[in-house]
Image: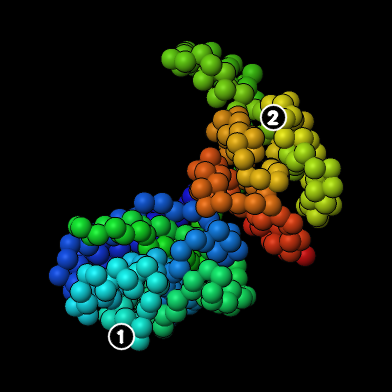
């Protein structure tokens, strides 16, 4: 995920400390290692959730107001609370199998939650220039197809920054801890850098003349194919009229997306998934790409890979949409360069909100 380097480092240090302290409480060696950070919507996160989760809500106060969420795999929560309560291993396995979490488990896990929150509090207060205070507000469980999923439960609808950590304890099979921070709160913790005033860049011929005058000699890359890709990336799809490119095989879906994006006033370029990306990008300055398909399959991901290879020096935001997403497909899409994930049929307001943010467009 692009940006939020400071927030990533804060969480990495805080969660490492939380693992050490919680391990001492449990009498076990527990490590919490931050492994990845992704942009997610609540819909995408819970849309393909197989296991239950135990959600801890954290209120951020003073100069950083808002709320974020710690999501543990339910089996991990049962394991840790049971260890703290001294429950026999056989009973722990049974509780995990049946997703049984009782009042005593919730109280016990609250102690572990306090450990995690304390480590976060210490790190945030030491790293942020303003006053920050985090307070654990409560917890709840969510099991797919059993517990209700609504606009507010088990956490509010919206777009989140997800920071995923791997949990490891010797002799135990564990999963992960996800920290979900709303985008607006993430921007408070780690504001995006201000864009410098745009300066007119010299054209390629002018640059060549300057190099000749100064006696500089360009260093030839080792790989000629890579050199061609990098060279084209500097110009292809980055000059000319601003445009939004839509790669989609379904005519109806493609037209609907095009209609939704007219508010940008950018030129709309529509094409099928198998279109020549380089040829399409030669038509103007691509400000945004939307890739759509029925399933999030290899064809869709291949288009994303080609775009990022072509624009590696000047990345373009990519929104990928599909009717059916698996967790693996979501992670692959984000790994290969997608900025946002949308489930079809695309909600107009959600699409407009994401496009405004990615293209830095002002609201109406």
- Between 291 and 224, the residue placed more toward the observer is 291
Image quarter for residue 300?
top right
Residue 120, above or below 332: below
Quarter of the image where one finds residue 128: bottom left
Question: In the picture shown, does residue 211 fall above or below 342?
Answer: above
x and y percent of residue 283 in the render?
A: 77, 31
Q: Which residue is tagged 1? A: 104
Around disc 2, counting alpha carbons within 10 Å, would you say few (fewer than 14), some (14 to 19), or many (20 or more)?
some
Q: Is residue 288 visible?
A: no
Please tell me the numbered disc located at residue 277.
2
Residue at (69% x, 32% y) in the render: 237
Mark 2: secondary structure: helix
Quadrant housing residue 308: top right
* Camera-side residue of 239 and 30: 30
| Mark identifier at residue 198 | none
Relative to 264, residue 114 above or below: below
């Amino acid at each position: 995920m692009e940006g939020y380097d400071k927030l990533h480092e804060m969480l990495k240090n805080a969660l490492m400390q939380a693992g050490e302290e919680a391990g001492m409480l449990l009498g076990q060696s527990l490590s919490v290692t931050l492994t990845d950070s992704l942009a997610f919507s609540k819909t995408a996160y819970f849309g393909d959730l197989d296991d239950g989760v135990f959600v801890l809500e954290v209120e951020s106060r003073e100069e950083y107001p808002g709320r974020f969420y710690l999501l543990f795999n339910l089996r991990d929560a049962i394991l840790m609370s049971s260890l703290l309560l001294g429950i026999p291993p056989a009973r722990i396995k049974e509780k995990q199998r049946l997703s049984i979490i009782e009042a005593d488990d919730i109280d016990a896990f609250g102690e572990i939650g306090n450990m995690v929150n304390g480590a976060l509090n210490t790190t945030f207060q030491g790293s942020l220039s303003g006053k920050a205070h985090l307070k654990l507000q409560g917890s709840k469980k969510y099991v797919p197809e059993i517990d209700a999923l609504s606009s507010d439960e088990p956490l509010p609808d919206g777009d989140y920054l997800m920071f995923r950590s791997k949990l490891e304890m010797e002799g135990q099979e564990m999963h992960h801890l996800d920290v979900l921070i709303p985008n607006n709160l993430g921007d408070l913790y780690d504001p995006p850098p201000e864009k410098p005033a745009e300066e007119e860049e010299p054209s390629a011929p002018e640059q060549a003349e300057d190099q000749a005058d100064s006696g500089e000699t360009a260093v030839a890359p080792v790989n000629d194919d890579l050199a061609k890709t990098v060279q084209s990336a500097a110009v292809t799809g980055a000059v000319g009229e601003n445009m939004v490119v839509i790669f989609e095989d379904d005519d109806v879906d493609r037209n609907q997306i095009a209609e939704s994006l007219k508010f940008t006033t950018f030129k709309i370029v529509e094409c099928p998934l198998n279109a020549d990306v380089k040829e399409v990008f030669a038509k103007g300055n691509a400000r945004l790409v939307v890739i759509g398909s029925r399933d999030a399959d290899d064809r869709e991901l291949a288009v994303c890979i080609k775009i990022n290879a072509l624009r590696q020096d000047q990345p373009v935001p990519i929104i990928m949409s599909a009717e059916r997403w698996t967790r693996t497909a979501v992670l692959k899409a984000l790994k290969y360069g997608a900025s946002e994930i949308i489930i079809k049929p695309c909600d107009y307001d959600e699409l407009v909100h994401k496009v405004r943010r990615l293209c830095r467009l002002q609201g109406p």
